[in-house]
Amino acid sequence: MSPAKNKRGAEARQRPATVTVCRGCCCGRPDKTPGVDHAAQLATIRAAVPSGQVRISDCLDVCERSNVVVVSPSSAGRAAGARPVWLGLVHDTDAMADIAAWIDAGGPGVAGMPPILALYEFSPSRRVRSESGLDAG
């Protein structure tokens, strides 16, 4: 195989960091978290993160932490040993802007997590991680 074809194949396998925003049974619902502008949150992350890097998920089964956002590492971040970072109780657009800036800098494993986001970080159960499919390489 020529070096050019090999390089194109490697580039095709490179995945950018992504953001999964839960909008299931509790997350994103005004009756669960009144006063939170859920539409503005989503607009903030979608405006700042390139298309295809923001996913909307149905219930991630950690309703006690709504609103939940999961930041999954890029291929480079995974190669560096990073795994998805679960963030809960994300109720403001500033947090979404911090998440977007982190993604723009490279995300988990490539760029350090903004210290403020450590306040939102949590570890879901193994069952939740497994069923979410977000830990799959």
Image (tube, grey):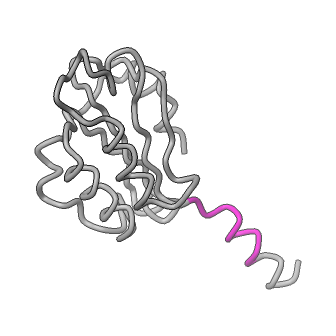
- The residue furthest bottom is 3
Judged left or right of residue 108, residue 49 is right
- Return the residue nearer the eye: 38 or 20: 38
Residue under the point 43% across and 58% down: 47
* Residue at image point 44% right, 59% down: 49
Q: Position of residue 126 (x, y in %)?
A: 36, 23
Q: Is residue 44 magenta?
A: no
Q: Residue 89 vs residue 27: left or right?
A: left
- Residue 61 occupies quadrant: top left
Q: Position of residue 57 (x, y in %)?
A: 48, 30
Task: Answer above or below: position of 117 versus 132.
Answer: below
- The image quadrant of residue 77 is bottom left
Instruction: Name the residue at 38% across, 15% down.
Output: 25
**Residue plotted at (48% across, 21% down):** 131
Image position of 115 with respect to 42: above or below: below
Q: Quadrant of the C terminus?
A: top right
Tell me the chief SS of the magenta region. Answer: helix
Marks counted in the figure total: 0
Residue closest to the eye, 84 or 81: 84
x%, y% of residue 101? 31, 65
In which quadrant of the rendered image does the N terminus lie? bottom right
Please report the bounds of the magenta region as a residue range: 7-15
Q: Is residue 65 left or right of residue 108?
A: left
